[in-house]
Amino acid sequence: MKYVFTTLLMLFGSLAWAAAESAQADSLVILFGNKTRLVIHSNDKAGIRQLSNYDINKIIRDMGMKLDSARAGETFVVIDENRVQRYLRDTVLIVTQRDGEVQVTIKESEGRRYDNSDDNHDSDWSGRSKNRRRKNDNWDIGVDGAGIGLNTLVERSANPNYPKESYQLRPLGSRYLSLALSQMPTIARSQHVAFKIFYGLEVSWNNYMFENDVIAQKGPNGIVFADAGRDLRKSKLTVCSVNLPLVPRLSFYNNSGRKMGHLGFGGYVGYRVDSYTKIKEQDSNKERQHSDFHLNDFRYGLIAHIGVARTNFFIKYDLNSMFKTDKGPDVRALSFGIGL
């Protein structure tokens, strides 16, 4: 690649093909290192001020990033006044020079960077997709798959042995927490929409805090919600599971490449690795008991991912019963909250 990149983007915008220099003419020269310069020539200072309305990134990308195309003469870019709107974008251009090579980095508003050189100038969107795939080659811990929220139980069929009052939950005390090791590669994308697949390994904790002073116990014929016979500060049942989620997702972007939101719908399978009750007395003494409590070891269900800008929401619903058949109430776990 040639070391000298001279007189790029002369006669910018409506200043294309300016007349010869005169006493009233003005020009803007930007130096990159010692061997590269950007010269913009205008008939007056007002023309120079118009540069703030245009996106130099887009102009250079349209040229294919072929920085070595400049010969001993001059390279011109002529902007069609009827199509000038396509250069009005909010992006940042970073030009660096090292070992005689000029590198242009486009940093968009959501923080993604795309490096371009004379060896990589096929197209704008193919380059972006390639760099996004490279970014998603790494596993992310606690990103997209992790979340914090609330739990509730949805009764599918009534059981006279387990009236709702016996296991009624505290709405704000029944919390959900998950951590994940995940990936989300881009399968296909256009300028405004990207199709991605979220998958990974997740560890989740479903905490069910009881409203009344009851203690969950494992009985010979099923779980028992026994009256504690005293005032408790709290009593809860916690279920820890390892899950494998798989969620196809559509992400949406505006003209500047800023992510506007996403929508995903998929499923998961999981296995219970631990479950225990925790009781906290009025004097703050705590008691914990581990057991399977006649819970189903395997679980499976549906997941929905909803994103608004940089905020992520999730909803999870178990399709199978929380307890084994006739060993507890016929309930399904429902969790919802915000991604971490």
Image (spheres, grey):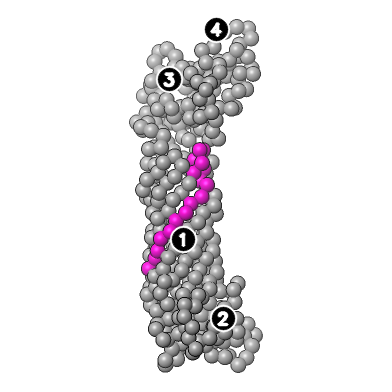
The mark that comes first in sequence, 1 or 4, is 4
Contact? badges 4 and 3 (CB < 8 Å): no
Work out whether residue 111 or residue 314 is closer to the camera in this orientation and state it. 314
Rendered view: 202 above or below 98: below
Q: Residues within 10 Å of mark 3 (few under 14, many from 20)?
A: some
The mark that comes first in sequence, 4 or 2, is 4
The mark that comes first in sequence, 2 or 3, is 3
Q: Which amino acid does label 1 sit on?
A: Ala
Q: Which amino acid does label 3 sit on?
A: Val
Give the x, y percent position of residue 233: 63, 82
Please say whether residue 121 is one of the residues in the magenta stretch: no
- Residue depth check, mark 4 versus mark 3: number of the one nearer the observer: 4
Left or right: residue 4 versus residue 171 is left
The residue depicted at 59 percent of the width and 77 percent of the height is: 170
Total residue callouts: 4
Work out whether residue 51 or residue 189 is closer to the camera in this orientation and state it. 189
The residue depicted at 42 percent of the width and 86 percent of the height is: 327
Rendered view: 22 above or below 152: above
Say which quadrant the N terminus sits in.
Answer: top left
Q: What residue type is labelled 2?
A: Gln
The mark that comes first in sequence, 1 or 2, is 2
Q: Residues within 10 Å of mark 2 (few under 14, many from 20)?
A: some
